[in-house]
Structure formats: structure tokens, C-alpha cells
Image: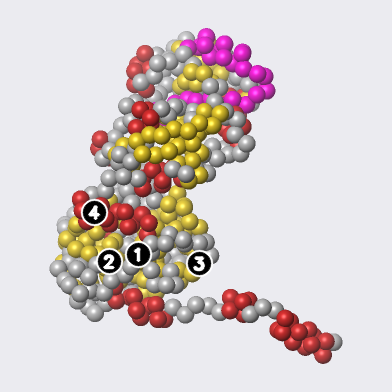
Amino acid sequence: MIRLFRSLTLLAALILPAWPLAARELPDFTLLVEKYSPAVVKIQVESDTRQAIQIQGWPPDQEIPEPFRRFFQIPAPQGQVPQQGLGSGFIIDQDGYILTNHHVINGADRITVRLSDRREFEAEVVGSDESSDLALLKVDARGLPTLRLDTDDDLRVGEWVLAIGSPFGLDYSVSQGIVSAIGRSLPNERNENYVPFIQTDVAINPGNSGGPLFNLDGEVVGINSQIFTRSGGSMGLSFAIPASVARNVIAQLKEHGAVARGWLGVSIQEVDKELAQSFGLQRPEGALVAEVMPGGPADEGGIRVGDIITAFNGKPILFSSDLPHQVGQLAPGAMARLVLMRNGKQQELELRVGQLPAADDRLSQRGGGKQQGQAASGPLGLQLEELPDQFRQRLQLAGGVLVRQVKPGTSAARAGLQPGDVIVQLGFTSVENVAGFRDLARKLPKDSVQPIRFFREGNPVFRSIVID
């Protein structure tokens, strides 16, 4: 038996191709680290107030309540002045341009950059972009070592990657892993979603913010930005900003000190299985337009509420998050070609994208609420009342009905409707009043699945509902 096993082992070694042996060999990162780590820098920031460098969106006296954290190390205890923070970055130009994260330097009064040879420079901010979480710094130095951003944009899941940074202040620490996914959607605190993040299992910790993510050719394919953690440390889920996003941002920050992005002026949501069925799609795909901003690029270009955008400039939109990734890469004023589904039929549109307004200039979130009134019973398990004038004015609506009660176990309950919702569309027809809603529900085919659009706390929402 032993002799037979040895014979089979020898035979397998002779006939199996050579590539599985090579695949079992791990890459050697030593040369890459030796060659490129001198261009990685440690960034120290100081601020005279704690609030200025506190992680964005959370008060200084509260623990961050969710697992997504930007990993910017803030070692100073609360109340100490000046406050200090540590991050990472890397040199992209011999004349002293350095790339890092926006959240590393946001609100800092003083920024110090330390090189691997222990030289230190005071840095000034050329420009910073909160939407992409990138910032461009400048130090007064020449002939510095540099890194090159990847230009092929052909990163693949499973590819080896390497990170260099200063986790917990430990300078020039190296960690390796693979690309776990690409195109991850992680909306920021303002619910913006302009970065298709690279997900890796590289060990990343506080202090790695702004450091480079390398491929095996020594090119920077990403800028480390966020981690998913329940403990405050690495859990094998880290996220980096792709080089394609960084190239565009760097060019604009150098020239203008700020970034201008393409903008459609729509609110969108995901298309699930039930919505796809109600809109006549064979499978869930695309970005469902839940609201069109009056006078915006989408409004002027002919996009309507209920359209499902399935392609943008020749690229498929499989998930709703794919659309802002594509739109944000365009320069304001550029023309865009869209493929969309409208009332079950495919259409094509061409429009000119606008410029994403500044945060302070964007349309404020519109509020809703419950009002008292005389309730009238209606179909689908709903008790409805006419929409009060103040609601209509606040939401800028021409019609609609207010949901007073939802009977448990009915179609409306299964669709997720709640008291206080304002229904504005059933099927492909606008709802003007309670009588109109009843008439629509009576005329639609029984047992059919139809889209229903409503406002909840000022936000437009599409769901699917079974007409019974």
C-alpha cells in the first residue's frame, strides 16, 4: 500500500502542470518595501480645540456608535490642549505634494510631515475634498522620493496588496492581504456616495489613514480610508479610495483648490425583486428615481420619477450605488447618455450634467409628520385622509393622501406603509386625493404587483404592493 501511494505521488508530480506549484508560493514584498517606503510619510496634526479634529459627525463626549470608523489616531485625552492626531500620507511629486485623507487634516491648526529619514516639514493645505475624503498638502522641499498612482484601473478581486503606514503611531509598519471586493458603497455622514471603495483584508488600524495601498508592481491602487470594527482595531475589513478617484481629485485640487463633481439632481433607491416585478423588469437592477429636483439637470433632461436608470454612458447600473459613482466622475457640463426603463419600456436620454452644489446650498431635507383629521376608510388595508395644505406646501406636492392607519396583515402592511406616510403614486399614476386613490386601486388588476410611491419624514420612497 505504501509503495502504491509513493508511485501515485511520483506520477502526479510528473503529469500536473507547473502553475499550481507557483501559485502556492507567497509573494516577496521585501524589495517593494525597500524601494517605496521612503515616499510614505507620517502626518501629525495639532489643533487648539478638540472639536476641530474630532472624528466627523460625532460629539467629542460620545463613543462612535457604529462599526465604520475612519482610522485617524487621536492619542491625547479629552480636555488636553493642544489636541494632537496622527495619520499617514505619501509623496506624489518631487516638489513636495503629499496626498492624505481629508479627515486627517480637517480642522488642524498645524500640520507636520515626517519623512522616513526623520526630516520634518511644516505642511500647508493646497486643497481638501470631504466627499472623497482626500486632501492635498504641500511642503517646501525638492527632490523627494515619490510614488506613482496606478493608471490601468484593472484591479481584480483576489489580487495581492500591501499597505504602509503608522498604525497607533508605529512608524512605517507594513501589512499585506488581498483585494476582497471592489466598488463597495459606503455613504459618508452627509449620505454622499461618490467613492467606489476597494475592500481588502489588509490589517489596518488607527493611524493608517491616508497611507498607500500598493499592488505587486509598486503602484498605488488605493488610499486607505476606513475600517469596519467593533473593537477599534482591525477585523479584516478595510476600505481604500481607488486611484482612479484620487487622480481626478488631485488634478482639481492642484488647479482650483477644490473639486467640482457632476450632478443629476435626483434621489434614488435600490430596486429589489418585488419592485422589479412591479416595474416590469426581468430581474432587480438599476437605480430607481424616487425624486427629481425641480429645475435640476435631470428635470431639464427629461428624467421622471419612477424611471429606472439601467446604464450611464455605456456602463451598466446594476445597483443604485453605481450611479453616483459614475456621475461624480464627470465634469460639470459634460453630456451623458442614459438608458432607462419607463412604464415597462426601455428609453434612451441624453442630458447635460450639472455641478454638485456645496453642502450649505443643497436642498434641505423636507419634513413631514402626523396631522389630526377625519379619517376615511380605503382599500388595501389603509385608512386615508386628504392631505392638509400645510403638508402639501411643505413637500411641494400637487396632490397626495395621508395614511392615518394601516391594518395589520394587509397588502399595505406587507408593503411597509406606516401612519404618517404621504402616498403620491399608485401604479404609474399620480394620486391626487382619497377618491382618486380608491378609483386607482379599484381599476388595477387584482393580484397584480404595483409600485407605490410615498413620502416618509420628507424622504421619497418606492415600494411594491399587491392589489387585492
**Picture quarter with the N terminus:** bottom right
**In what element is the residue under mark 1?**
loop
Question: Would you say the residues marked 1 and 2 are in contact, meaning their CB atoms lie under 8 Å apart?
Answer: yes
Question: On residue 253, which mark appears?
Answer: 4
- Inspect the image, locate mark 4, and give the three-letter code of the amino acid beneath it: Leu
Residue with the mark numbered 2: 92
Whole-Å distance between the Cαs marked 4 and 1? 16 Å
Tag 1: residue type? Answer: Leu
Identify residue for label 3: 159
In magenta stretch: residue 191? no
Which badge, 1 or 3, is on the more N-terminal residue?
1
Instruction: Look at the image and say whether residue 445 sits in the magenta stretch.
Output: yes
Q: Residue furthest bottom?
A: 3
- The answer to whether residue 187 shows anywhere in this view is no
Residue 299 image point, x, y percent? 37, 28
| Sequence-earlier tag: 2 or 4 | 2
Circle 4 Cα neighbour tier, 10 Å, few/some/many (<14 / 14–19 / ≥20) = many
The residue beneath circle 1 is 149
Whether residue 232 is situated above or below residue 160 in the rendered picture: above
- Point out the tag, 1 or 2, that comes first from the N-terminus: 2
Who is closer to the viewer here, 325 or 48? 325
- The residue drawn where x is 50% and y is 21% is 425
Residue 126 visible in the current orientation: yes
Residues in magenta, as a range: 433-460
Q: CA distance from mark 4 to mark 3?
A: 30 Å
How many marks are shown on the rendered structure?
4
Callout 3 amino acid: Glu
